Image: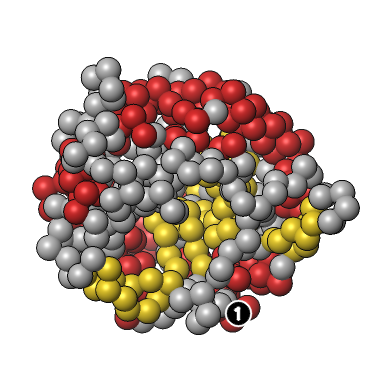
Amino acid sequence: MLRVFNPNNLSAQYRDTKIISFIFIATILVVSSCILNNSITNTTYAKSKDKPDKDIVNSNEGHDGIIHESGPHLGLNMKGYYTGLPQSREGFKNPYPSNYYASSFKAFSKAKIIDHVRYRVYWESYVKNPIEFIKELKHVAKLADKYGIKVIYDNHQFHTSSWLDVGSGTGFPAYLFNDAVLYKQDSGGIPKSAVAEAWWTNWWNRAIKSVNGTDGWRLQAEFLKKIVKTVDKHPSTLGYEILSEPQVHNKNQWSKIGKYNTFMTKELRKLTDKTLIYSMNIPIDLKSPIRVNAENLAKMSPNNKQNIVFKFSLYGIPKDGYQSDKLQLFENASRIAGVPLYVGEWNNVKRVATTLEGKKSFVISARQSDISQTDANTILQKFKGIGIWGMAYWSWSFLPEKTPNFNLVKFVYDKATGEGKMKITKYFGIMENAYQEVFGQASHDIITGPKK
């Protein structure tokens, strides 16, 4: 039969052919893309296995176009002896157990879920006894290597210095308070203190000098470099915290802190490429005239954000109200600055109002403070929800605490030998269970695929 040419039929056939061709080509592209992505992912994963100790910190796109996300670092805070001695008062009243470090690191390793400690060091402690200070650092680093525990060396301060707060302060060395009129000894180092405000204001203005006129920032950088030179070669060294919880007293100081962190980062990067951590300020008063907001907190970040982490503390359950607002504040600041978050201190406390030097403030109530398993789990679930870089429970120390949940361990001493026997408290179990239940085994160097 002779078929009559019909252009309409040809058009229909052409459309059908075009659709089939499109589907075929699209299928090829999808399959090719999957193969390519799988190849890239497998190659990157192989690289990460070759270097298991490499901690990829920022959840950012790497040089190879792959997003690298580290699992959260799960740990606790730890206090040392010579690394924590104050200058302006005698040593610790409680004895120092000879088996403190060996027993402690063995316990951390046995827990398995704990991967790091945030180890507190104080500048004035180094000045008081530099030989024993460095010796203790070396001992900590070697034991951490042995037991597979990472260490963050935290340049800590509490109430500025023992010079300003003889009773409980530790931090900056006495030679930075050489103006006896302006910085009278034991005149107060807390944020509410007028003397502390004057000192911190001068510190951010880079006007604090030593007795011989040397710049305070430069002196602190040299102190931190001594720590880096001592421990950086150890595989256990995870990073360094520039200065824990500095005080802010004026809204114009945020950018100055950014310059300070930029200076310290630049100096430390001459010696190390490991994680550097800068800290939130105190006080965190959301209604303060110093304007504690995300934009200002972000100004504290250094210019070079490579392998930089922002640390904050949270002592409460962030369900709603103040603690929830704080967590949101830090999350927003982290997003603006473009750096991940580290909860350098977490626990649960109750504070009560008190009046000091005519000013109202809130202090921790040892009697009312506590943390339950439910509390701990709830806190960690909040952290998990915002993709935290890591966290460290407060705290582990050979010294007893008035607030029971502030110490994961206690030592009972033999009256005859004086030797201390370590006893882990129930709070260690609460912390360990919370880490396990919320995060499972800590994981690092997770490859999530190419950025979309």
Can residue 241 be seen?
no
Q: Residue 325: where, in percent of width, then height?
A: 30, 72
Q: Residue 137: where, in percent of width, then height?
A: 61, 32
Residue type at numbered disc 1? Ser
Q: Residue shown at 19%/54% (left/top)? A: 194
Q: Nearer the viewer, residue 179 or 263?
A: 179
Q: Residue shown at 20%/70% (left/top)? A: 358
Q: Residue 27: where, in percent of width, then height?
A: 49, 53
Q: Nearer the viewer, residue 302 or 178?
A: 178
Residue 322 lies, with reference to residue 222, above or below; the image says below
Q: Nearer the viewer, residue 85 or 264?
A: 85
Q: Residue shown at 64%/67% (left/top)? A: 431
Seen in the image, is 131 located left or right of residue 335? right
Q: Residue 23: where, in percent of width, then height?
A: 44, 58
Neighbour tally class for label 1: few under 14, some 14-19, many 20 plus, Cα within 10 Å = some
Seen in the image, is 178 located left or right of residue 139? left
Secondary element under disc 1, as helix, strand or loop, is: loop
Residue pushed farthest right?
Answer: 416
The quarter of the picture where residue 174 lies is top left
Seen in the image, is 105 located left or right of residue 230? right
Q: Quadrant of the N terminus?
A: bottom left
Residue 422 lies, with reference to residue 69, above or below; the image says below
Can residue 242 be seen?
yes
Image colouring: secondary structure
- What count of labels does the image hold? 1
Seen in the image, is 98 located left or right of residue 217? right
Circle 1 residue? 372
Q: Residue shown at 31%/76% (left/top)? A: 354
